[in-house]
Image (cartoon, rainbow, N blue to C red):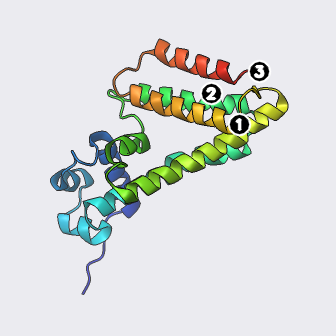
């Protein structure tokens, strides 16, 4: 007779996501996972597969919970300047809530694994493509309203904003100085201005 699971899979997956996010893939051992998830090794493997499979599920969960919301907002927003500012403000707020900023799970993953793991590279690339597309829509709206410059294409400006926000996500891992945040946000927004 099969045993019934006595844990919430989504809650355990969120614990795994946070553990990988904090430590990185390579620095997270199977024992770290067992200890951090609060389930037995056999339950972990039976439910989520091996460490790599669990990591992929955690990364997809991160996309659903953190990234897809921003993608949707970019496609639907009318206050495009506020949308762009909020991208940066979210990084600032997230970094200030932690003793030691973890940065962004997707960016951390891209830096650590995308060059050596094709499955992870595909997920990270899909996130980047989708987020860039949402930024293009928002920036094009801003250009049409005269809020953003038309001296560059919406796609070029979207890539600039995306790269700047990802750079900030790396920087917060070692520097959460408020003035640094404000300088980056202000310069980025000034580049978008007509």
Q: Residues within 10 Å of mark 2 (few under 14, many from 20)?
A: some
Q: Position of residue 100 (x, y in %)?
A: 32, 28
Q: Which residue is at a point 26% across and 83% down the rendered structure image? A: 2
Residue bearing mark 3: 194
Query: According to the image, label 2 marks what residue?
Result: 85
**Quadrant occupied by the N terminus:** bottom left
Please tell me whether mark 2 or mark 1 is closer to you in this view.
1
Mark 1 residue element: helix
Specify which label sits upstream in the sequence, 2 or 1: 2
Residue 6 visible (yes or no): no
The C terminus - image quarter: top right
Element on which disc 3 rests? loop
* Residue most extreme to the right: 145
Of residues 95 and 24, the one drawn nearer to the viewer in this rendering: 24
Residue neighbourhood size for the residue with mark 3, other residues' Cα within 10 Å, grouped as few (<14), some (14–19), many (≥20): few
Residue receiving disc 1: 154
The image quarter in which residue 104 lies = top left
**Residue at coordinates 36% horizontally, 34% vertically from top-left?**
102
- Compared to 81, does 133 lie above or below? below
Q: Is residue 10 left or right of residue 91?
A: left
> Given the current orientation, which residue lies at the most extreme left position?
31
Q: Nearer the viewer, mark 2 or mark 3?
A: 3
- Counting every numbered tag in the picture gives 3
Q: Is residue 24 above or below residue 41?
A: above
Question: How dense is the environment of label 1, judged by Cα within 10 Å: few (below 14), some, or many (20 and up)?
Answer: many
In space, the residues marked 3 and 1 are separated at their CA atoms by 13 Å
Q: Position of residue 156 (x, y in %)?
A: 64, 35
């Amino acid at each position: 007779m099969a045993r019934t699971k006595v844990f919430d899979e989504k809650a355990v997956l969120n614990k795994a996501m946070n553990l990988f996010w904090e430590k990185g893939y390579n620095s997270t051992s199977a024992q770290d996972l067992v200890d951090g998830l609060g389930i037995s090794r056999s339950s972990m493997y039976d439910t989520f597969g091996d460490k790599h499979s669990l990591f992929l599920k955690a990364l997809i969960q991160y996309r659903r919970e953190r990234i897809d919301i921003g993608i949707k907002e970019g496609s639907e927003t009318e206050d495009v300047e506020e949308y762009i500012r909020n991208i940066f403000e979210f990084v600032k707020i997230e970094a200030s809530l932690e003793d030691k900023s973890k940065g962004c799970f997707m960016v951390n993953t891209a830096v650590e694994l995308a060059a050596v793991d094709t499955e992870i590279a595909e997920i990270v690339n899909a996130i980047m493509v989708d987020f860039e597309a949402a930024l293009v829509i928002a920036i094009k709206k801003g250009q049409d309203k005269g809020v953003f410059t038309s001296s560059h294409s919406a796609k070029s400006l979207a890539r600039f904003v995306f790269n700047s926000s990802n750079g900030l996500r790396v920087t917060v891992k070692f520097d959460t100085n408020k003035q640094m945040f404000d300088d980056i946000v202000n310069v980025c927004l000034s580049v978008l201005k007509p």
